[in-house]
Image: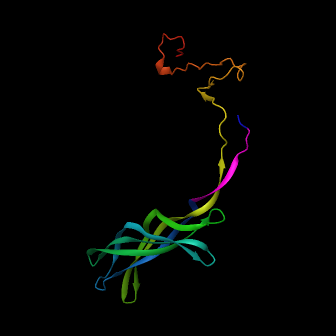
């Protein structure tokens, strides 16, 4: 076994330099036609959630963050005056995800990526009267995550060149043939072990051990 010290080198590579995850809660208002009276929410659903853009921005007092833009569709089923109706609204959103920076310095080529960890879902939906207007307010919850990628300098360990040629297989050591001077005390000099797998042995084979 070699006793050479592990060498350390510095390389420049593209790597994840920061990560962030955040849960957001926002209110969405769907305006109901004024002719609809005695409104009752029967159900809701959120579909077609997607991220459109992710960019790196520097915000005061927060440092590097990822600005995420996306959209989803909100569907609401409600009753009014002994009738039912369905409403749909496409919601666009923009959120800022704070990052935990990994390491000390990002050299260049900063890029951001984001993904939806938990699809948006409606926690609560209720009718609200605003003077002459009536709305259905939905409280939407969403979990987003982001990563910051860039060229950075990292340290890597370099293993020294192997000097031996022995390896262990099934608990037995294989030693390559060598000169008598190098292995004069070796009982397996110039020999290989005859290894057999269990499926290759018959019950009559003396090496078979059931």
Q: Is residue 79 left or right of residue 13?
A: left
Q: Residue at x 49, y 65 (%)?
A: 113
Residue closest to the eye, 39 or 117: 117
Q: Quadrant of residue 148?
A: bottom right
- Residue located farthest toward the bottom when viewing the structure as drawn: 132
Q: Is residue 42 left or right of residue 114?
A: left
Residue 55 to residue 36: above or below: above
Residue closest to the eye, 185 or 141: 185
Q: Quadrant of residue 99?
A: bottom right
Colour convention of the picture: rainbow
Per the image, is 93 magenta?
A: no
Residue closest to the eye, 152 or 135: 152
Q: Residue at x 48, y 16 (%)?
A: 201
Counting from the top left corner in percent of width and height, residue 196 is at 52, 20
Q: Residue at x 47, y 69 (%)?
A: 141
Q: Residue at x 73, y 41 (%)?
A: 4
């Amino acid at each position: 076994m070699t006793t050479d010290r592990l060498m350390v080198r510095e390389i420049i590579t593209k790597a994840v330099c920061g990560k962030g995850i955040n849960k957001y809660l926002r209110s969405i208002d769907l305006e109901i036609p004024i002719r609809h009276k005695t409104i009752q929410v029967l159900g809701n659903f959120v579909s077609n959630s997607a991220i459109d853009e992710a960019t790196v921005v520097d915000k005061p007092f927060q440092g590097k963050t990822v600005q995420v833009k996306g959209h989803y569709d909100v569907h609401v089923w409600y009753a009014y005056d002994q009738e039912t109706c369905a409403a749909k609204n496409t919601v666009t959103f923009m959120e800022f995800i704070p990052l935990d920076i990994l390491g000390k310095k990002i050299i260049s080529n900063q890029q951001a990526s984001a993904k939806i960890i938990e699809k948006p879902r409606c926690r609560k939906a209720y009718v609200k009267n605003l003077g002459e207007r009536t709305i259905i307010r939905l409280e939407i919850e969403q979990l987003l995550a982001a990563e910051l990628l860039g060229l950075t300098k990292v340290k890597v360990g370099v293993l020294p060149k192997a000097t031996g040629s022995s390896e262990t297989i099934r608990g037995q050591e294989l030693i390559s043939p060598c000169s008598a001077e190098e292995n004069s005390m070796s009982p397996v000099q110039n020999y290989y072990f005859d290894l057999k797998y269990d499926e290759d042995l018959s019950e009559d084979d003396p090496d078979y051990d059931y």
